[in-house]
Amino acid sequence: MSFDSSKNYSDLEVYELVEKCQLDDKQALEELLRRHEKIIYSTLYHLDPKREDIADLVQEVLVKVAKNVKKIRNPKTFKYWLNQIIMNLFYDELRKKTRKIQTISMDTAFVNKLEDEIPQGFDVEDMAKKPHEEILGGELDEIIKKGIDELPEQFRIVTVLRELQGLSYEEIAQLTGTNIGTVKSRLARARAKLQEIIKPYLS
């Protein structure tokens, strides 16, 4: 492995940080955990919005990452590996609550980026948004987030993994123990529901 020594840790790609972590670089590990802490929190929150101990679960995930990062065979698969940890913890917590997931059957990316969660198709051509557009965008973000939180559990899980985390259908199917057709069906119905929720705000 070779690294560009002129790069700051904040400039490194995730896979580069992982490679450095596997060489016992503590600064790289700190940067990797710092960069993903909010992502982990957001994912866990949307998976189960009613939980009150999400901060504790985030710390649990971070500890698992720190302890097991050397086990990643391909550093470029870090995102999928991280989501395996998150989903395993999520399902463990579900089993503890002995709560069954509703079996309802909902495609397409609706929210692409986890950090800013901008809905597709709502970017104005002029990147300098007017004040009322800023307000509308903020309101839509909150409405979309709330809508995701209110989806039935199976729909919410695939929506979070696809729309917020950007995982492929294949990856989601593996994480949830379903097939690609089921994933697409649930995502399609989830998106339809979200479109119903935001429709009044787009007229």
Image: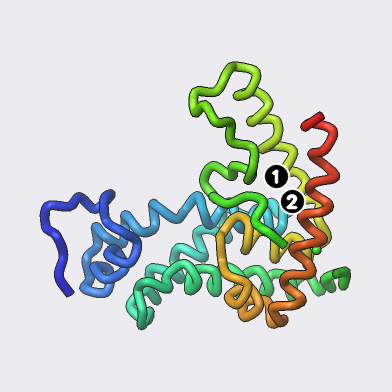
Determine the secondary structure under disc 2.
helix
Residue 52: x %, y % from top left? 69, 51
Corner quadrant of residue 12: bottom left
Corner quadrant of residue 160: bottom right
Q: How is the image coloured?
A: rainbow
Corner quadrant of residue 18: bottom left
Residue 153: x %, y % from top left? 79, 63
The alpha-carbon separation of the residues under discs 2 and 1 comes to: 5 Å
Residue 83: x %, y % from top left? 54, 69
Residue 135: x %, y % from top left? 65, 23
- Going by the numbered disc 1, the residue's amino acid type is Lys
Left or right position of 148 against 173: right
Front-lying residue, 133 or 32:
133
Specify few, some or many for label 2: CA neighbours under 10 Å numbering under 14, 14-19, or 20 or more: many
Front-lying residue, 195 or 164:
195
Front-lying residue, 55 or 72:
72
